[in-house]
Image (spheres, rainbow, N blue to C red):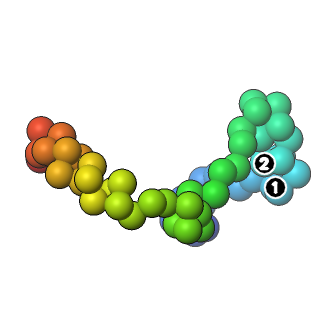
Amino acid sequence: MYGDTNSEFNFSIDWLERFKARDEFKSYRRFGESGSVVMENIKDVLPQIRAKLENFG
């Protein structure tokens, strides 16, 4: 799954596809929908998000 970083695991593409189908893994696009974001809404909410993130830092 991660190239040569961990050579202990060797999975074929067919095995991986069957595993994903059996366990109902889905693929979602994480990026590429930036046009659907309303920037004005982000500017209003950004201070609240930053305040919440300070609790984790």
Figure check: 17 above or below 36: above
**Residue 44 spot, x, y in % from top left:** 26, 53
Rendering quarter of residue 56: top left
Rendering quarter of residue 26: top right
Foreground pick, 47 / 31: 47
Residue 3 seen in the current view: yes
Left or right: 13, with 41 as reference point? right
Residue placed at 66% from the left, 51% from the top? 28
**Residue 17 spot, x, y in % from top left:** 83, 47
Looking at the rendered structure, the kind of residue marked 2 is Leu
State which mark lies toward you, 2 or 1. Answer: 2
Foreground pick, 25 / 39: 39
Left or right: 47, with 42 as reference point? left
Please name the residue that numbered disc 2 is placed on. Answer: 16
Q: Residues within 10 Å of mark 2 (few under 14, many from 20)?
A: few
Rendering quarter of residue 55: top left
Q: Residues within 10 Å of mark 1 (few under 14, many from 20)?
A: few
Left or right: 39, with 13 as reference point? left
Please name the residue that numbered disc 1 is placed on. Answer: 12
The number of numbered discs placed on residues in the rendered structure image is: 2
Distance from label 2 to label 1 (Cα)?
6 Å
